[in-house]
Image (cartoon, rainbow, N blue to C red):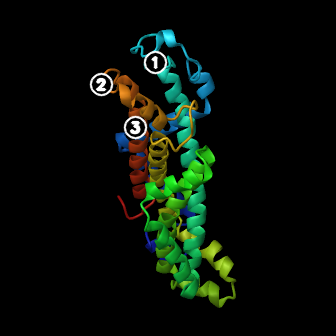
Amino acid sequence: MTENAVADGWATPPGGTKSKARKRWARHFLRSPVSLVSLLCVLGTVVLALGADAIAPQDPLVQDVRDRLAAPSWDHPFGTDALGRDVLSRVIHGTRVSLTAAVSAVALSALLGVSLGIIAGYVGGLIDEAIMRIIDSVVAFPAIILALAFVTAFGATLRSVIFAITIVSVPLYARLMRAQILSVKETDFVLAARAMGASPWRIMVRHMLPNVLAPIVVAATLGMSYAILAEASLSFLGAGVQPPTPTWGGMLNDAARYIHTNMYMTLFPGAAIFILVLSLNYLGDTLQDAMDPRSS
């Protein structure tokens, strides 16, 4: 890795300075209690999603109309909904849908967006124009309207939700990657690789991508929070994963009519969305600082 790459501020210095990079990461997380709490909240949500069947106190689909709209108690810490289902169990199982949709959509959109951005930035010319005009056409539509259109066209399923969030998220990664590629396209290490006869594919993947990948990692972390909000919004509008599968947005939709009499039905799924999204945003900010060697 060259001095230009290190001076760019995102690349990790080679060799013996790797320990300094690790110390910088630890310093950024340990010196900020908010960052540590955010990391623990995200990890805790992942644990809940993976172990929902074992952690949830009751079956989230079992109905008990005799105990419907019960207030929080020892038997039902978060109360019950209009069909007598345990809200705590449904919130825990709802993490699976939210995280599955978010992780899958971010992974797919980042992969597609990075591929388009690196090709557009490196090749340039008509290919760059064609790719960026397609990206602009996607951005021209309001994201939630475009997502609703895709879900309506392909059906209200988890796969359709992931596909819809992926499509509306691609422009972020494509534009960011294109800008990063343009910033290093004429640097010494790229010119040297080109002069030595390296193929364009090798230059893009082996030389340029590692030096511009850090901002994409940060964007993906922040994109997770957007994907969770998008999935919750689609579910709230009735275009997401359909009942009886528990989703946070769907629970808010079911509880909207009882907000004045049974506020807890909206409080707990809403708090789950708020805490996870806020934690991911703080985590993204911390990652941005930790991956920048110029930060103290």
Answer whether labels 1 and 2 touch (C-beta < 8 Å): no
Is disc 2 placed on a helix, strand or loop?
loop
**Identity of the residue drawn at 42% across and 44% down:** 277
The answer to which of 235 and 180 lies nearer the viewer is 235
Residue 83: image location, x then y, percent: 50, 19
Label 2 to label 3: alpha-carbon separation: 23 Å
Residue 260 appears in the picture as rendered: yes
Query: In which quarter of the view is residue 296 placed?
Result: bottom left
Query: In which quarter of the view is residue 74 placed?
Result: top left
Question: Crowding at label 2, few (<14), some or many (≥20) Cα neighbours within 10 Å?
Answer: few
- Residue 260 got which mark? 2
Amino acid type for the residue under numbered disc 1? Thr
Question: Crowding at label 3, few (<14), some or many (≥20) Cα neighbours within 10 Å?
Answer: some
Measured along the vertical axis of the image, is residue 279 above or below residue 132?
above
Answer whether labels 2 and 3 touch (C-beta < 8 Å): no
Residue on which the image places disc 3: 275
Residue 194: image location, x then y, percent: 63, 87
Residue 2: image location, x then y, percent: 54, 76
Residue on which the image places disc 1: 80
The answer to which of 138 and 293 lies nearer the viewer is 138
Mark earlier in primary sequence (1, 3):
1
Answer whether labels 1 and 3 touch (C-beta < 8 Å): no
Residue 30 appears in the picture as rendered: no
Label 1 to label 3: alpha-carbon separation: 21 Å
User: Which of the two marks, 1 or 2, is nearer to us in this view?
Assistant: 2
Residue 209: image location, x then y, percent: 58, 70
**Identity of the residue drawn at 44% across and 58% down:** 143
Question: Crowding at label 1, few (<14), some or many (≥20) Cα neighbours within 10 Å?
Answer: many
